[in-house]
Amino acid sequence: MYQNINKIYHAAIYVRLSKEDGDISSSAKLESNSISNQKALILDFLKDKKDIEVVSVRVDDGYSGSNFDRPAFQAMLEDIRRGIVDCVVVKDLSRFGREYIDSGKYIERLFPALGVRFIAINDNYDSLKGKNQADEIIIPFKNLINDAYCRDISIKIRSNLEIKRKKGECVTPFVAFGYRKTKTDKHKLEIDPSAGSVVQDIFKMKLQGMSQDAIANRLNELGILSPFEYKISSGSHYETGFRQKEQALWSSVTVRRILENEVYIGNLVQGKRTTPNHKVKQTYVKPEDDWIRIEKNHEPLVSDRDFEIVQRLLGMDTRTSPDQKQVYLLSGIAVCADCGAPMTRKVSTVAGKKYAYYLCSTNKETKRCSSHRIPEKDLEDAVLVMLKQHIQNILHLKRVLGFIGTVPFQEINMKKLQDRLEKKKQETERCKELRMMLYSDMKEGIVSKEDYVELHAAYGKRLRNAEENIRAIQKEMNSELEKADKSNTWLDYFVKYQDIEELSRTVVVELIRQIRVYDKKNIEITFDFDDCYQTLLNQLPAMGVDTVIDDDNNLQVKVKEVV
């Protein structure tokens, strides 16, 4: 065996095991690639090499070979630059790296330039022996194969993750604050009772008028752990680049992220970010249309209704005063009827007495609109009166609907769908019969084989189209039934406040979309579900009910007949 005993080489043993290698189910493959076995194989190889002295063992456990940004590898390079190491020994080329271009750069250019001997045992390669003609072809070819293997593994992993996401399986290592992975299935989410109650409190505080800053301060005052600290306390190895202090506290940004996350209404949204390929680790955000969203995938912490209201509030300019923890009662809801700008609350002191009023923010800042000034109490009293009247109208409607029912309308729509369904079913049966008759005609010589093939394909296409139409109609029927069950649930949002005697921020944001102020005597209110309210009023005549809204906004109804 050839050995150059004139020089003693100071070697670094380099071993690597990627996560993908560690996940391989074959025990034989796992054992052959294990860290301990790589070390043992290399040490056994070097035991009779008198010209090689081992000075370090560098281990990258759980790092991909698709790039060389690995801590142990970089530490080995630093030893080479400092002259501590002048020989690198690996089990084979795939353990050194699976990236074709950079692997070739190190083996063929950088190591020779630095006088570093490179040995890949299983590939029978030792740079000290010099390259023969076979090495000129085989070594780059093996690196190319290793690169292709890494690319193939990456594609398979991406494809597998995509399938899991579409099946509603959670594939992220860490889940949203308020949830945890079930013990029986790591891809399923369940509510974490402790963190979940904090999430529900955050939504309640927002509905009550607290700003994100105020909510964060309140949580910090109560000593409630932030999502980061909670994950750490739960034994998680979670890391973040947003931590600035020894203990990560709640912030307005953290609160807003929770308020905007639809995971809390049971929707699982994954696949938001990706990388161009397995070699580039820089991620980018995919278009929202490409996200994988599975609705009602797990138990929600917040109702759809509360979540929708909170999203509306987050879009409003509802900043609080420095000495206030909550926004004012009508902040963001009351707007100028002329320019549409929010009404701003101001306080004036006259003869030692304070007067609060609302005025147009455009007028306050630029004077380009009239003030539309209205005393705060007058505005709130008027809103309460109009809201109570609207709730009474809703109660009246609910009683009328309870009397006449809405079943006839549902039955009319369902009857139409049922008729369409029956026709399509008859069409499928007819196509099947024609195909059977066609076969008999061919056997008897009435239809040629060529005509049989053409007609059989045509009937098959008609059959498939009819079957697709049947599935679409059945889906529409299910949707119609769900719509009938939920079409008037909005009435209950108003009914639960039938005994209201004073306004609160929660009531305002739940029931009122906008208050337009014309002057101190004229305001206009758009209630939530106003479109549903108007639609229902328009439907009542067809049910045998006449409706009239009098000058005082009272709903008057007269039932002519029960339909």
Image (cartoon, helix red, strand yellow):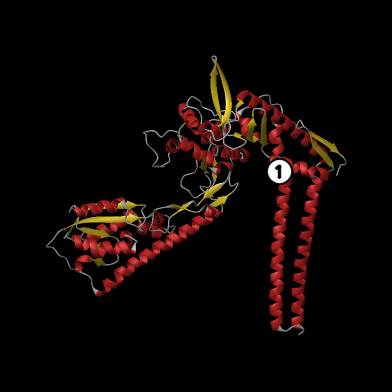
Q: Give the image quarter of residue 306.
A: top right
Q: Residue furthest top?
A: 351
Q: Residue furthest right?
A: 561
Q: Give the image quarter of residue 205.
A: top right
Q: Where, quadrant-wise, is the N terminus in this rendering?
A: bottom left
Residue hosting label 1: 486
Question: Which residue sits at x=22%, y=66%?
Answer: 127
Type of residue at label 1?
A: Lys
Q: Tell me, yes or no, if residue 48 can be seen here.
A: no
Count of picture labels: 1
Q: Where, quadrant-wise, is the C terminus in this rendering?
A: top right
In front of the other: 522 or 318: 522
Question: Which residue sits at x=53%, y=33%?
Answer: 367
Residue 337 x/y as whole percent: 62, 36
Residue 113 x/y as whole percent: 20, 62
Instruction: Give the side of residue 45 with respect to residue 548, left or right.
Output: left
Q: From what the image shows, is residue 336 above or below residue 410?
A: above
Residue 105 x/y as whole percent: 27, 63
In front of the other: 331 or 164: 331
In front of the other: 31 or 348: 348
Instruction: Give the side of residue 211 with respect to residue 154, left or right.
Output: right
Question: Which residue sits at x=39%, y=61%?
Answer: 150
Instruction: Give the side of residue 74 with respect to residue 297, left or right.
Output: left
Q: Tell me, yes or no, if residue 559 can be seen here.
A: yes
Question: Which residue sits at x=51%, y=56%?
Answer: 162
In front of the other: 315 or 40: 315
Q: Give the image quarter of residue 207.
A: top right
Residue 342 x/y as whole percent: 57, 34
